[in-house]
Amino acid sequence: MGTSACVKEVDRSALVAFAPDAPFLAAGTMAGAVDMSFSSSANLEILNLDFRSDDRDLPVSGAVPSSEPFNRLSWGKSPSSGSEEFSLGLIAGGLVDGNIGVWNPRLLMSPEERENALVQQLSRHKGPVRGLEFKPTHFPPLKGSESSTHGEIAYLSWNKKVQPILASTSFYGTTVVWDLRKQKPIISFSDSVRRRCSVLQWHPDFATQLIVASEDDNSPSLRLWDMRNTMSPLRELVGHTKGVVAMEWCPHDSSYLLTCAKDNRTICWNTNSAEIVSELPAGTNWNFDVHWYPKLPGVISASSFDGKIGIYNIEACARYGVGEGHYGSAPLKAPKWYQRKAGVSFGFGGKLVFFSHNWFFIWSFRG
């Protein structure tokens, strides 16, 4: 594994959620993963991300036991602005027994208050919780049996542009878009062979587009759909040879999508061209969870069945796995976070040109 690509790591078989506004990540023991000691205990930990230090370890800032291991983990912002009690937000974990644990990470990192870190335990579901995502706006739950007729839910995602719109996808191959204002589905679709779906993500920029991944080893597709026409997908990303298990869109440049699959490949795609632009170095076992770090562009996490969480520089991964003759490969383009936010230059005739993200000015100087 390339040392320049992996900048931090820790021995954990755990799902990851980055803090929205602080240099921490939460790690929750992954359901179904076994560590080297065959421990059956489950924990929620807060790990410190200090990129100023050359130490590759991720020190533990706090830990509490969990009643069950995790299927999903999410870290949301403070429910109320200016709240000192929830200054680091809330962590929610979807557990294998159907419960949802909600923790206060500020208390979790305090030795004196750690025993009070569990804020609430929600008991609504009868099966494992595999869909979990924070939303700052409150909406009432879906009513009646309508929400249970589309099969066992594999994942859900809030629309990034239209607040009341939610999408879910199922192991039966059906994706449903819900309007919580009307308390009912507004569209449902599946592909022609009803591939077993594993994860979906709304496009960060286009309100009507979402991407759905399949964990079917015989057809490990990544298909971009437009809700204005679901007769066929808008685009397909071809590269994985076994089922896709996790993915996430880059929060700093929406042309990048990160995926990992059972073929032991973790790929960064250009979703506009459907080309592979970067790939993580392969370990001895495949990754099951990947995320972009929201505070530092180009930094990602990958959790593997090797029992490790790695923090990687995606740009240093560009030379791994993608050879010159690889089908669908492309050079890593300059990402949006490299664009100059402002600049100034003198021109002929006493002219001064200044630009920023929203402005462009020319001044004329006369002696």
Image (cartoon, helix red, strand yellow):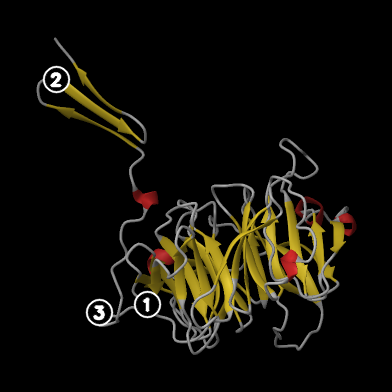
Residue 3 shows up from this direction: no
The reply to whether discs 1 and 2 touch (Cβ–Cβ < 8 Å) is no
| Image height of 350 relative to 260, above or below | above
Nearest the eye: 243 or 253: 243
Helix, strand or loop at disc 1?
loop
Q: Secondary structure at mark 2?
A: loop
At x 75% / y 57%, what residue is drawn?
142
Q: SS for tag 3?
A: loop
Mark 1 surroundings: few (<14), some (14-19) or many (≥20) residues within 10 A? some
Q: Which residue is labeled 2 in the image?
A: 350
Between the C-alphas of marks 1 and 3, the distance is: 11 Å
Residue at the disc numbered 1: 320
User: What residue is drawn where x is 49% and y is 90%?
Assistant: 218
The type of residue carrying mark 1 is: Tyr
Q: Disc 3 residue type?
A: Glu
Give the quadrant of the C terminus.
Answer: top left
Q: Position of residue 358 (x, y in %)?
A: 36, 32
Q: CA distance from mark 1 to mark 2?
A: 49 Å
The outermost residue toward the left is: 349
